[in-house]
Image: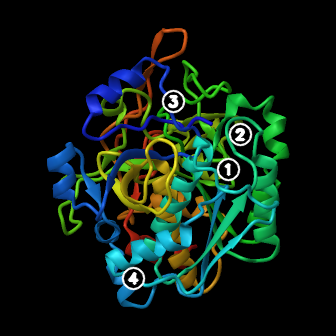
Amino acid sequence: MRAKGLAALVGTIAAGAAAMAGGSAPALAEPLHELVPHVFAQPPTTAECETDFGIACYSPLQLQSAYDMAPLYHHGLTGAGETIAIVDSYGSPTIQGDLATFDQAYGLPAPPSFQIIQPAGAVPAYDPNDSDVVGWAEEASLDVEYAHSMAPGANILLVETPTDETEGVAGFPQIVEAENYVVDHHLAGVITQSFGATEQTFPNPFAIYALRLDYVNAALNNVSVLAASGDGGAADSELDLVDYFPFRAIDWPASDPLVTAVGGTQLHLNAAGARTAPDNVWNDTALLGGPAASGGGTSTVFPRPFYQGSVASQVGFARGIPDISMSAAVDGGANVYLGFSGTGGVTPGWYVIGGTSEASPLFSGVVAIADQAAGHWLGTLNPALYAIGDRGPTPITDITSGNNTVTFTNSNNVTYTVNGFTAGPGYDLASGLGTADGARLVGELARFP
């Protein structure tokens, strides 16, 4: 398994970047997260991360503030009565304890209900020597902790699947089965997915169309489906899980028109969570020595959906992603508690994690609260997001700086630069419509149309 983007060892970032730039260092593929493998005994502050390692790190309380969630909580809008389904291969052996430790550290309430299901078959026993299994355990903790932090009153449903999702078709039949189970049994109003596979790694477009019946099912049952847009910037992983395609490419399921693709931004926050500078497109490629940036571009499989008609000048005749963006930077990563040990030096403690794997669960919390405010499930979100984004003033804050260009060296020792997209006024293929003002966006979504 190879995660899209590269992890960096804090404290030896320069050395790690030099090693990874050679193309032979392991990277995580899906899941779409970037782990900084330095463990803290206590959750670090932003100042400690900046002083000790030269990067920022943020708590859930800072992110709640940055996304203007307090007015919602003040009015009892916490996601109460709603359920967020989080889908991950394998899951985590310590996830319930991880969330309890996370909540205690930050004074968050436990979710009213936290259930784990395995509808596509029993998950193999946790193997701390299997880097794929460990990577998914990291992913599960990130997903659960940050979906919960944004919607602390929502129920959490962790949906574990028994097969590793990497590139191409692998793992997706079990994901389809699991997600159809969630939809058919009306278990959740929003599904978040922090994984994906490059469109070009599937045998043909029909292979993708055959795997998207769960998204059709979700749309018919008013379930909102989100997906991380990817961590490879304008490029994306090849099927060999080692190299990147030397041309623009994007992930599915983020590229699916029935899915809301959540891209990545870099936040600049003080200790209270107030912005010290505007958000920009997430791109840590220079810091990490290989592709580590918000996935974005146009699909080779899906034509432009009707709701992107207003942004046809940007997407052309194809489906464009992302739709919206949230925090994903490693330099500005999320504090996550991991309670397990595993390969790569992982031991119980606090870590800093970034990637669009963070962005999708963050947005799932906003959606769950919008469901609560509306009094019903909102279903497919994109028509509403683009209609809202066309209005002014909008609860979606435009991102106008940064790009998702990436440079990398493949196993053939050739270095490539894939020129990406630059953020500017309005919709763009680096940041989508922009980023959420939680309180205002919940109100707009709940009232739509």
Residues marked 4 and 2 touching at CB (< 8 Å): no
Q: Which mark is residue 257?
A: 1
Q: Mark 2 is on which residue type?
A: Phe
Q: Quadrant of the C terminus?
A: bottom right
Distance Cα–Cα, label 4 vs label 1: 29 Å
Q: Which mark is residue 72?
A: 4
Residues marked 4 and 3 touching at CB (< 8 Å): no
Q: Mark 4 is on which residue type?
A: Leu
Residues marked 1 and 2 touching at CB (< 8 Å): yes
- Which secondary structure, mark 1? loop
From what the image shows, is residue 235 above or below residue 303? above
Distance Cα–Cα, label 1 vs label 2: 7 Å
Of the two numbered discs 3 and 1 on the same chain, state the one appearing first in sequence: 3
Question: Which residue is at the front of the view, 155 or 308?
Answer: 155
Q: Which residue is mark 3?
A: 26
Q: Which residue is mark 2?
A: 302
Residue at screen point 38% across, 81% down = 108
Question: Can residue 117 be seen in this snapshot?
Answer: yes
Of the two numbered discs 1 and 2 on the same chain, state the one appearing first in sequence: 1
Decide if residue 90 is on the left or right side of residue 389: right
Of the two numbered discs 3 and 2 on the same chain, state the one appearing first in sequence: 3
Q: Quadrant of the N terminus?
A: top right
- Which secondary structure, mark 2? strand
Nearer to us: label 3 or label 1: 3
Residue 262 percent across, percent down from the top left:
51, 52
Q: Mark 3 is on which residue type?
A: Pro
Question: Which residue is at the front of the view, 8 or 209?
Answer: 8
Distance Cα–Cα, label 4 vs label 3: 42 Å
